Image: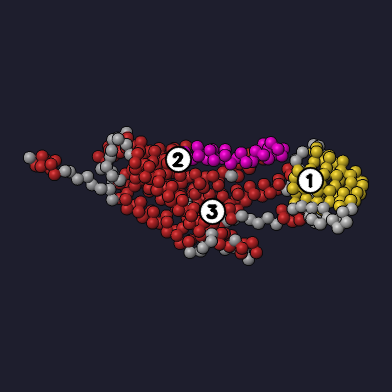
């Protein structure tokens, strides 16, 4: 590898790493705020919080890396032009392709990393994230029931707990069961617990009463009990039969959905997500080519290349919007899948054409006359 390629590539790699870290930290911080509720209000340890945000990292990198490579190319090549290093390289006889070679190498490296993320690390981490999130959401005694809060455990069942002890015992329990709207029931107890069983989760209460009103006669009924159990089997079944979201699935499960009812219902969405996994990393090459075409084509201007940089940013933003629109359209119409592949291919071809066809500066007739004289 020529030394000039190593020189530019080293700067590009360092800039890409720096931009990736900065953007990832910004997105990570905003997304992590949603998980702080588990720490502050639900008593989960900080180690669990770090596990949560760590599992989100691949999904952030899948969005950030192509943009980071594009920003790095714009910054480094603009800096080389402003420091007149690009002029020296051109005077030394380097062609457009030789100048663009470091950026293209960076694009290939980032694309390989992107494919490893989208095809393996993203579904693996997101699946573990959703499993862990689901497990904590279904850990009734430590997560769902909060002191002094009315909590809806399942449709029609609301629980209020005045106090929760360190060993999981609940004190001051109120349960309102409205699963039968014609015959709602309210139960209160001094203490109890929320436990899991083979039939599903259940609320076990001690030393309380059960109140109900007959909707037909309006008669009030009050029953005192030493021990009473409220079954929540519907909630347990819903938690156990959780459907895998598209981001949790590997490529084979996306492109070839099973015959399960929900898979068939969302079949086109799953297929669209699978093709998006294959197309998404290609935009890294497209974005880098746009940056190269903007900064290496045309003549050098000592006033700067602000207009070209802004034009490149506008093109990347337009392609990002087109990618999202095509993905959304493909989830409803299979014909749009062709457009998902056509967009990066056409943009790549156009970028290569603009990059390699740098206009040659022509002298004015007056200067040609002076030269001949």
Left or right of 215: which side holds 62? left
Viewer-proximal residue, 107 or 22? 22
Q: Which is closer to the viewer, label 3 or label 1?
A: 1
Characterize the magenta stretch by its predominant secondary structure. Answer: helix
According to the picture, the residue beneath numbered tag 3 turns out to be 119
SS label for mark 3: helix
x, y percent for residue 216: 86, 58
One can see residue 285 in this view:
no
* In the image, residue 40 lies in the stretch drawn in magenta: yes
* In the image, residue 316 lies in the stretch drawn in magenta: no
- Reading the chain from its start, which is encountered first: label 1 or label 2? 2
Near mark 3 (Cα within 10 A), the count class, few <14, some 14-19 or many ≥20, is some
- Reading the chain from its start, which is encountered first: label 3 or label 1? 3
Contact check, label 3 and label 1, Cβ < 8 Å? no
Q: Distance between the residues labelled 2 and 3?
A: 22 Å
Viewer-proximal residue, 33 or 18? 33
Residue name at image x 35 percent, y 54 percent: 350
SS label for mark 1: strand
Near mark 1 (Cα within 10 A), the count class, few <14, some 14-19 or many ≥20, is many
According to the picture, the residue beneath numbered tag 2 turns out to be 16
Contact check, label 2 and label 3, Cβ < 8 Å? no
One can see residue 243 in this view:
yes
According to the picture, the residue beneath numbered tag 1 turns out to be 159
Q: Distance between the residues labelled 3 and 1?
A: 42 Å
x, y percent for residue 130: 64, 49
Give the extent of the magenta segment: 19-46
Left or right of 316: which side holds 171? right
Q: Which is closer to the viewer, label 1 or label 2?
A: 1
Name of the residue lying farthest toward the left: 373
x, y percent for residue 143: 73, 43
Rendered position, 15 above or below 180: above
């Amino acid at each position: 590898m020529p030394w000039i390629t190593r020189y530019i590539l080293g700067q590009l790699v360092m800039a890409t790493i720096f931009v990736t870290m900065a953007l990832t930290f910004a997105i990570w911080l905003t997304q992590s705020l949603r998980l702080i509720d588990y720490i502050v209000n639900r008593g989960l340890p900080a180690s669990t919080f770090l596990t949560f945000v760590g599992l989100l990292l691949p999904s952030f990198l899948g969005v950030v890396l192509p943009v980071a490579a594009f920003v790095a190319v714009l910054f480094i090549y603009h800096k080389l032009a402003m420091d007149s290093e690009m002029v020296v390289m051109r005077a030394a006889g380097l062609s457009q392709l030789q100048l663009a070679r470091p950026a293209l190498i960076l694009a290939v490296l980032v694309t390989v990393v992107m494919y490893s993320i989208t095809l393996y690390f993203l579904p693996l981490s997101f699946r573990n994230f959703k499993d862990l999130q689901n497990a904590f959401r279904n850990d009734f005694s430590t997560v769902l029931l909060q002191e002094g809060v009315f909590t809806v455990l399942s449709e029609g069942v609301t629980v209020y707990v005045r106090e929760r002890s360190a060993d999981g015992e609940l004190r001051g329990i109120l349960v309102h069961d409205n699963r039968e709207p014609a015959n709602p029931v309210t139960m209160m107890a001094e203490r109890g617990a929320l436990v899991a069983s083979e039939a599903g989760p259940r609320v076990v209460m001690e030393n309380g009463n059960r109140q109900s009103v007959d909707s037909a006669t309006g008669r009030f009924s009050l029953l005192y009990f030493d021990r009473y159990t409220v079954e929540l089997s519907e909630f347990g079944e819903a938690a156990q039969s959780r459907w895998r979201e598209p981001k949790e699935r590997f490529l084979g499960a996306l492109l070839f959905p099973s015959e399960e009812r929900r898979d068939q219902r969302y079949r086109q969405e799953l297929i669209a997500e699978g093709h998006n996994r294959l197309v998404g990393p290609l935009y890294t090459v497209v974005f880098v080519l746009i940056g190269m075409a903007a900064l290496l084509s045309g003549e050098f201007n000592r006033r700067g290349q602000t207009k070209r940089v802004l034009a490149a940013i506008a093109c990347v933003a337009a392609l990002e919007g087109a990618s999202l629109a095509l993905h959304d359209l493909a989830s409803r119409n299979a014909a749009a899948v062709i457009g998902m592949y056509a967009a990066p291919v056409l943009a790549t071809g156009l970028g290569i054409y603009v990059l390699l066809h740098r206009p040659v500066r022509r002298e004015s007739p007056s200067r040609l006359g002076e030269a001949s004289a």
